[in-house]
Amino acid sequence: MKKIYFFIFFIFLVGLVSSEEIIVSPGEINFDILQGQISCKNITISSYGEIALKDKWGEKWSATKELSEYFLSKEELNLHLDYSSDIFIENKTKLSICFSGEDIGRYHGVLLVKNKESKSGIGIWLNATIRGSSYTSRLTGAFLNSENKANFSLLFWLSFTSLLLILVFVFLLLKKK
């Protein structure tokens, strides 16, 4: 008789237990853009039901993986992240995530993917680098000024004099031996 009660109790428990599963790929997205440029990446979400997406960001330049440090909104950082925030998935779907921003810097965030009908959820790490719109040279303007022939002559004579001094020094060392 105990076996029958145990079997009925077991069947009852199996009916109460439900498992929700959300699978997201990839687990991390990297954006590397110029100011004002837009970059889009695809993610794949496997689940069933209504899914809500929400992004949170850490402070500029911070690269921690501590979820509690991601409390800023994209608006606070002047970032633009476009995606469908509420979707219904029956099995698997691809979703496009587009990123742009105005302020130069490195940004780290998380895209939270949560099943609305349960407490299950998962996150995707977001890494974004926004670079200036043009390459800046480290050479000074005086060196690059082609109209000023005196700068070129000065550079030539400094190089020539240095080479001459090195040759004289080597000659004296060889003569000493």
Image (cartoon, rainbow, N blue to C red):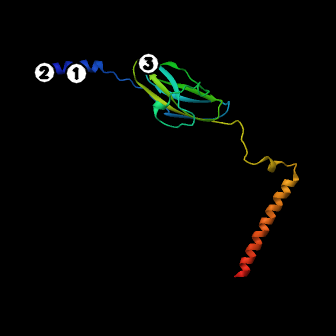
On screen, residue 174 versus residue 15, left or right, reads right
Q: Check the image and report above or below for 86 versus 138.
A: above
Which residue occupies the foreground of this view, 130 or 2?
Answer: 130
- For disc 1, the marked residue is 10
On screen, residue 62 versus residue 122, left or right, reads right
Residue 138 in the image: state x and y as whole percent: 72, 47
Q: Earlier in the sequence, mark 1 or mark 3?
A: 1
What is the C-alpha distance between the residues marked 1 and 2? Answer: 12 Å
- For disc 2, the marked residue is 2
On screen, residue 76 versus residue 161, left or right, reads left
Q: Amino acid at mark 3?
A: Lys
Which residue occupies the foreground of this view, 26 or 124?
Answer: 124
Residue 74 position by quadrant: top right
- For disc 3, the marked residue is 116
Q: Check the image and report above or below for 93 versus 176.
A: above
What is the C-alpha distance between the residues marked 1 and 3? Answer: 28 Å
Q: For the point 72% across and 42% down, which residue is it?
A: 136
Q: Amino acid at mark 2?
A: Lys
Q: Earlier in the sequence, mark 2 or mark 3?
A: 2
Which of the labelled discs sits on residue 92, or is there none? none
Residue 106 in the image: state x and y as whole percent: 59, 36
- Per the image, label 3 sits on a secondary structure element best described as loop
Q: Check the image and report above or below for 86 versus 71.
A: above
Which residue occupies the foreground of this view, 122 or 170?
Answer: 170
Name the quarter where the C terminus is drawn: bottom right
